[in-house]
Amino acid sequence: MLAVPKTKSKKKLPIKTIQAEFNHMIASGEPCAKCGQVFPVMQCSHIRSTKKQPNLRFDPMNVLPMCGYHHNFWWHLEPSESWEWFTNKYPGRLEYILKAQNKLVKWTPDRLLEVREKIRNRDLQGLLIAPELLS
């Protein structure tokens, strides 16, 4: 009987590691979407939370770069004001998010490796989970 060679298993990356890389790509060095200032530490603010809509976690249409003040003390604490601002400043984005959130995405190890590669290449278009909605 022939021995079947063992294949090396792919190392499983924690989704939180890739999320941190994505957040850094979105926010680092970018101006705050609200005030326009750049600070040494910027944050990635999700429009729809990764808990409620995990399929949108790496979609660039679902995030904004924000300074800590506007992310923590405005976006999260003034939801009606921030929501009105968002829909006025980014017309069409909410429509995309509401449709894209229904697209099922399974974050398999292979899929996460693909996402990581797109993050490293800053391939925002490739990270969209529903690019057909933008056409």
Image: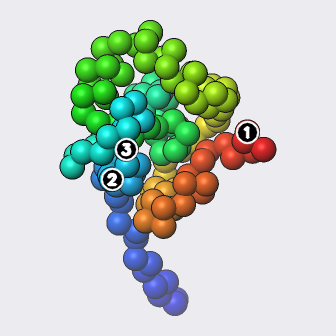
Structural distance between the alpha carbons of marks 3 and 2: 7 Å
Residues under numbered marks 3 and 2 in contact, where contact means CB atoms less than 8 Å apart:
no
Point 33% across, 53% down: residue: 29
Give the image location of residue 57, x and y in percent.
46, 40
| Cα–Cα gap, marks 2 and 1 | 28 Å
Horizontal and vertical percent position of residue 78: 35, 12
Q: Quadrant of residue 125?
A: bottom right
Which numbered dot is residue 133?
Answer: 1
Amino acid marked by disc 3? Pro
Q: Mark 3 points at which residue?
A: 31
Q: In the image shown, does 43 or 56 lie closer to the viewer?
A: 43
Q: Which residue is drawn at 72% across and 42% down?
A: 134
**Where is residue 76 drawn, in percent x and y?**
33, 19
Question: Which class describes the residues within 10 Å of circle 1: few (<14), some (14-19), or many (20+)?
Answer: few
Name the residue that disc number 2 marks. 29
Q: State which tag comes first along the sequence, 2 or 1.
A: 2
Q: Which of marks 3 and 1 is nearer the N terminus?
A: 3
Q: Single out the mark in the foreground, 2 or 1.
A: 2
Residue 129 image offset from top left, x and y in percent: 61, 45
Marks 1 and 3: in contact by CB < 8 Å?
no
Q: What element carries label 2?
A: loop
